[in-house]
Amino acid sequence: MQHPRPSPTFIVCSANGAVVSAFTNQGNTLNIACTIYFRLKPEKLYELYNNYKQNYMGTFSKQLTAAIKNKAAMYKNEDYYVKREEIKKALFIVCQDTLLPLFAEGVYLMLREMEFPENIDQSLIEKVTKKEGVNTQTYLQQRDLLLSAIKVITAEGQQNITQILAKS
């Protein structure tokens, strides 16, 4: 019978290009490449083996990937540019919380990269352009309504002036 041995590290996303593909809270795809270092709890190895046999690494991978995806969905697109350290800490905490019931403890999270796919720039430009188009259309409609109201007020004023002149 072969029991799990304490392992110093576990790689959620390897350096050979495998990444967690997640979504932002705005629905855009984001690729997160990271490594989570953890320690198996020596006093819990028996329980680990009873629950997962030798397949504990597959379980860890699935659970950690799901946790990272869920946490990533809490941030806006621009947060990935301006809040990198905050996001790294949040991802590490969620990984630690995920590992605890799996008889392991998170030691360190190395965040190699968080990037949007190449086509995201065009997607964001289209979203902004569409929004600006809606804003422009709304502005034009409001402007036209105001111009119409001004014409009505001007015509009513001119009519009042004409009536006053006619009475005098």
Image (cartoon, helix red, strand yellow):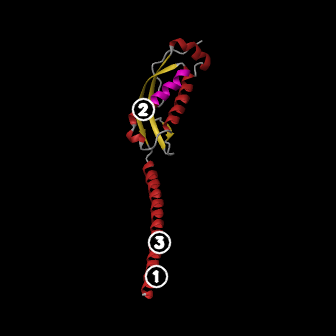
Give the image location of residue 133, x and y in percent.
46, 61
Identified at 42% across, 32% down, the residue is 88
Q: Nearer the viewer, mark 3 or mark 1?
A: 1
Mark 2 vs 1, N-terminal side:
2
- Which quadrant of the figure contains the N terminus? top right
Dots 3, 2 in contact, CB < 8 A: no
Side (left or right) of 20 relative to 48: left
Q: Is residue 27 magenta?
A: no
Residue 45 seen = yes
Side (left or right) of 36 relative to 102: left
Q: Is residue 93 magenta?
A: yes
Disc 2 residue type (three-letter): Lys
Disc 3 residue type (three-letter): Ala
Give the image location of residue 162, x and y in percent.
44, 84
Disc 1 residue type (three-letter): Gln
- Which quadrant of the figure contains the C terminus? bottom left
Q: Nearer the viewer, mark 2 or mark 1?
A: 1
Which residue position is annotated with label 1?
159
Side (left or right) of 58 relative to 132: right
Which residue position is annotated with label 3?
149
Label 3 vs label 1: CA separation?
A: 15 Å
Which residue position is annotated with label 2?
88
Dots 2, 1 in contact, CB < 8 A: no
Mark 3 vs 1, N-terminal side:
3
Element type at marker 2?
Answer: helix
Mark 3 vs 2, N-terminal side:
2
What are the residue bounds of the magenta stretch? 91-101
In depth, the one of 120 and 55 nearer the eye is 120
Element type at marker 3?
Answer: helix
Please say if 148 is above or below 58: below
Q: Which mark is residue 109?
A: none
Q: Residues within 10 Å of mark 2 (few under 14, many from 20)?
A: some
